[in-house]
Every structure is written in structure tokens, then in C-alpha cells.
Amino acid sequence: MAAKTDAEKEILEEEFRSLEEQKAEIEQRKKRVQYREQFRHAGYVYVISNIGTFGEEKDVYKIGVSLRDKPEERVDELSDAAVPFDFDIHAMIFSADAYALENALHKALMPDG
């Protein structure tokens, strides 16, 4: 489609730029999906506690996994739903296999029974 006027040309150029931006966004999403497929166990292992709820003497910690880009969002959800006080974050560790790391931490930190 050939533009007959400068105004038509400008409209077509703007549409082209918009399509290029959409294409770039789709490519970014595609890369994220491919990364997630390749590294579907990649994520963050968090170690949190809540002194306000459990008290300082309890030595109670929660170890969990978040596969989110912003793992703090998961901790915020736990703070909102589970306890009257916000959780304190002691560690946030990225791992290619977050579930294996979480399991190893649970085993290593379990008190002798």
C-alpha cells in the first residue's frame, strides 16, 4: 500500500513502529517462556521468620520456594494471610534447582530428634 500524502505516510510509519514494538514484546515473552521451560525448577529459596508471632526464643523459620521473578511478593502474601506481623527475610537464594536446595536446607537444619 503506497502512501499518497505525507499524512498517510506518517500514519503508516506509526503503525509500522507500533507493530515493531508489539513484535519485540512478543519476542521477549517467548524468550521468558523458553527460559522457564528450560529452567522450570529455577527460582528462589527463602528463609523467613516471624519473631512477632513466634517469639525470639522459638527459633522457628520457614524455608520455601518461589519461582516468581520477584520472590518478595510470595513473602508478602504469607505476611498478609498467615500471621499478624510481616515476615523477616533472612535469606533469598537463587538456584537452578530451587526445590533440591530447599530440600537440602530442610534436611540440614532439622534439629536432631
Image (cartoon, grey):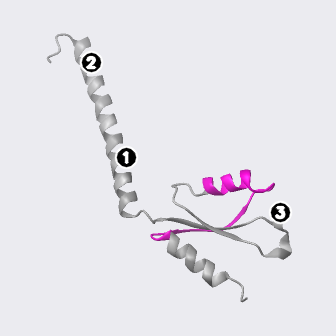
Give the foreground label among 2 and 3. 3
Label 2 SS: helix
The N terminus lies in which quarter of the figure? top left
Q: CA distance from mark 3 to mark 1?
A: 40 Å
84 displayed left or right of 110? right
Give the foreground label among 3 and 1. 3
> What is the crowding at mark 1: few (fewer than 14 residues within 10 Å), some, or many (at least 20)?
few
Looking at the rendering, which quadrant does residue 104 occupy? bottom right
Q: Measured from the top left, where is residue 15 in percent x and y?
A: 29, 24
Label 2 sits on residue: 10
The C terminus lies in which quarter of the figure? bottom right
Looking at the rendering, which quadrant does residue 112 occupy? bottom right
Looking at the rendering, which quadrant does residue 108 occupy? bottom right
Q: Earlier in the sequence, mark 3 or mark 1?
A: 1
Q: Amino acid at mark 3?
A: Thr
Q: Amino acid at mark 1?
A: Arg
Q: Residue at x 76, y 73 (%)?
A: 60
Residue 88 versus residue 20: which sits nearer the camera?
A: 88
Q: Measured from the top left, where is residue 7 in percent x and y?
A: 26, 12
Q: Amino acid at mark 2?
A: Glu
Label 1 sits on residue: 29
Q: Are marks 2 and 3 in contact (CB under 8 Å)?
A: no
Q: Earlier in the sequence, mark 2 or mark 3?
A: 2
Residue 65 versus residue 89: which sits nearer the camera?
A: 65
Magenta span: 73-98
